[in-house]
Amino acid sequence: MAENTNNTGGGGNTGLAFIVGAVVVVLVIVAWFVFARGGAPETKQIDVDVDLPEVSAPQVPGTGG
């Protein structure tokens, strides 16, 4: 009698587990940077004043003016 030694282990899932683990580590690092600074960044009051001088068009030649 011969033993049946078919190895049909889950070796194919090792690569997938490695990728999922790497994604989890990256998400933890991103979350640490986001929440370690106290969450949302502070809001700043920005006041932009755009006052341009009035500019007139140049005179057209030949209109006498």
Image (cartoon, helix red, strand yellow):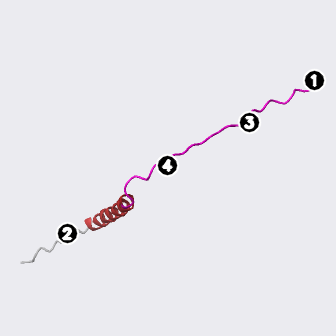
Give the amino acid type for the residue marked by disc 4 in the picture.
Lys
Residue that appears at 37% across and 55% down:
39
Within 10 Å of the Cα at label 3, are there few (<14), some (14-19), or many (20+) other Cα atoms? few
Instruction: Tell me, for residue 53, which label it has, or none.
Output: 3
> In this orientation, does residue 12 appear?
no
Structural distance between the alpha carbons of marks 3 and 4: 28 Å
Relative height, residue 34 to residue 58 (above, below): below
Which numbered disc, 1 or 4, marks the residue closer to the eye? 4
Q: Nearer the viewer, residue 4 or 51?
A: 51
Give the amino acid type for the residue marked by disc 2 in the picture.
Gly
Which numbered disc, 3 or 2, marks the residue closer to the eye? 3
Structural distance between the alpha carbons of marks 2 and 1: 94 Å
Give the amino acid type for the residue marked by disc 1 in the picture.
Gly
> In this orientation, does residue 20 appear?
yes
Q: In the rendered image, which residue does mark 1 sit on?
A: 62
Q: Under tag 2, what secondary structure?
A: loop
Residue lying furthest left: 1
Q: In the rendered image, which residue does mark 4 sit on?
A: 44
Within 10 Å of the Cα at label 1, are there few (<14), some (14-19), or many (20+) other Cα atoms? few
Magenta residues, as a range?
36-65
Residue that appears at 62% across and 40% down:
49
Q: Under tag 3, what secondary structure?
A: loop
Q: Earlier in the sequence, mark 1 or mark 3?
A: 3
Q: Earlier in the sequence, mark 1 or mark 4?
A: 4
Structural distance between the alpha carbons of marks 1 and 3: 27 Å
Give the amino acid type for the residue marked by disc 3 in the picture.
Pro
